[in-house]
Amino acid sequence: YELTQPPSVSVSPGQTAIITCSGDKLGNKYVSWYQQKPGQSPVVVIFQDAKRPSGIPKRFSGSNSGNTATLTISGTQAMDEADYHCQAWDRSTVVFGTGTKVTVL
Amino acid sequence: QVQLQESGPGLVKPSETLSLTCSVSDYSNSSSFSWDWIRQPPGKGLEWIGTFSHNGGTFYNPSLKSRVTIFVDTSKSQFSLKLRSVTAADTAVYFCARGSVVVTAASYYFDSWGQGALVTVSS
């Protein structure tokens, strides 16, 4: 099973960044999203498609339908510049997406 | 918040076995958690290696299954990874992580991660 993400997304400060994750019938699985800054471990920002862990800002939101899951960052801030990875669980194996580098210009 | 910390050699010779241990501050046998290894080659994405799962079984990435063993030592609150017959392609930062699992909902995500350990395969 494979999850495909765009390699990069660029966004201006205060604008909305949209990151996609595509996989066969992905809407039938729960998707999580992780933020990873250089030299750091990943941090979950969205789980079960759309839930935010405590401490994650409300500007992070998620959705999942059909073959595509989406992570949306509203009012993007400079601190949101990072790599973002989607993840799903398929037949007792975990799959990560190819990763997207978000650049805040 | 549970804390995880990887330990082990940072340099392994080709064809030998990579061994890492993850120490967990609050190890739980709860059926809600799994204990996983994930790696990230330099400049690349995340790759799941495998898990000691919430139900006590082990599951591995099919691409690594023939070379991987994950096991738990509950008395030491640790779980470990062994990867045999390594090559340069196994050079990566290795993370241990806790999986939060809800089987009935098919939900599985990682709520806690170690800081990562760089392992280089080189002679």
Image (spheres, coloured by chain):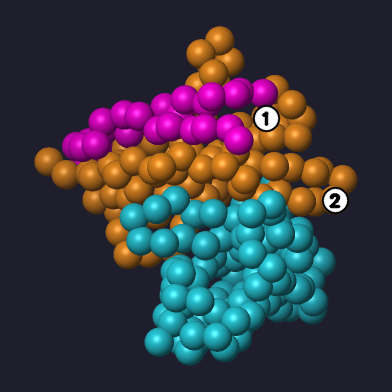
Say which of B60 and B30 sits in front.
Answer: B30
Residue A33 image-quadrant placement: bottom right
Q: Which residues are magenta?
A: B1-28
Q: Which label sits in the foreground, 2 or 1?
A: 2
Q: Is residue B120 above or below residue A34?
A: above
Q: Is residue B41 above or below residue B30?
A: below
Residue located 69% across and 54% down the image: A53
Tell which residue pokes out farthest to the right in this image: B104
Relative image position of residue A91 (x, y in whole percent): 72, 52
Residue type pointed to by label 2: Ala
Q: Which residue is mark 2?
A: B105
Q: Which chain is cyan?
A: A
Describe residue A26's horizontal placement relative to residue A33 as left or right. right
Q: Which residue is mark 1?
A: B57
Q: x, y percentage for residue B50?
A: 55, 41
Query: Which chain can be seen in orange?
Result: B
Q: Residue at x 65, y 35 (%)?
A: B34
Residue B20 highlighted magenta (yes or no): yes
